[in-house]
Amino acid sequence: MFKRCLLLLSALCLLGGGPVYAVSYVTFDEHFTTNFGDPEKPKLSYLRVNVSMKVADDSTATRVRGHEPFIRDLIIRHLVRQKVETVRTEEAKTQLLTDIKTSVTEFLTEEEGEPLVEDVLFTEFVVQE
């Protein structure tokens, strides 16, 4: 029995049957750059972020990518509403991620029948004042 299991494991390794990970990430090819801040002030600030979304697997990632233009628009709408005074705090960044995830999952649930996105992450976050 032990030899049979060892032989089966060896065959799986030879056939490329390594570990299977049940997670994938959707990363947008282009970063998000937008101006934001108080329109009453003479100088606007700029925000540049990269966003990745955690999904269950590659097929789910393909479904999410099919909605990329609308999802990008949702993210940009959240970014332009930020305030210079708060965008630098960890709490504000966490809240922004939560708000983006909520908007994206609501949209995908409406379009695809399920939320699809498990989490939203910033992979870059730069503020220029």
Image (cartoon, rainbow, N blue to C red):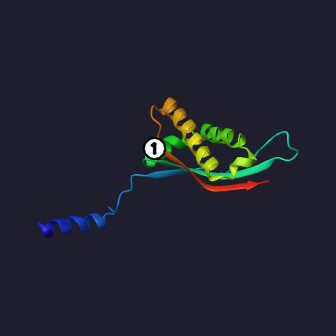
Q: Nearer the viewer, residue 116 or 91?
A: 91
Which residue is at a point 43% across and 47% down the rendered structure image? 56
Percent x, y of residue 87:
69, 49
Q: Nearer the viewer, residue 90 or 54?
A: 90
Up-down: is 86 above or below 103?
Answer: below
Q: Is residue 4 visible?
A: yes
Give the total number of marks visible in the rendering.
Answer: 1
Circle 1: element type? helix
Furthest-top residue in this view: 110
Question: For this view, does 18 lie left or right of residue 85?
Answer: left
Which residue is at a point 34% across and 61% down the rendered structure image? 19
Identify which amino acid the numbered label 1 is placed on: Thr
- Picture quadrant where residue 67 is located: top right
Question: For this view, does 84 lie left or right of residue 50?
Answer: right
Q: Residues within 10 Å of mark 1 (few under 14, many from 20)?
A: some
Q: Is residue 34 visible?
A: no
Q: Nearer the viewer, residue 30 or 84?
A: 84
Up-down: is 48 above or below 37?
Answer: below
Percent x, y of residue 32:
68, 49
Which residue is at a point 76% across and 50% down the rendered structure image? 46
Question: For this view, does 70 lie left or right of residue 5?
Answer: right
Which residue is at a point 45% across and 34% down the rendered structure image? 114
Percent x, y of residue 1:
11, 66
Please give the residue where the numbered disc 1 appears in the rendered image: 60
Up-down: is 69 above or below 86?
Answer: above
Furthest-right residue in this view: 42
- Picture quadrant where residue 3 is located: bottom left
Percent x, y of residue 41:
86, 43
Up-down: is 62 above or below 6?
Answer: above
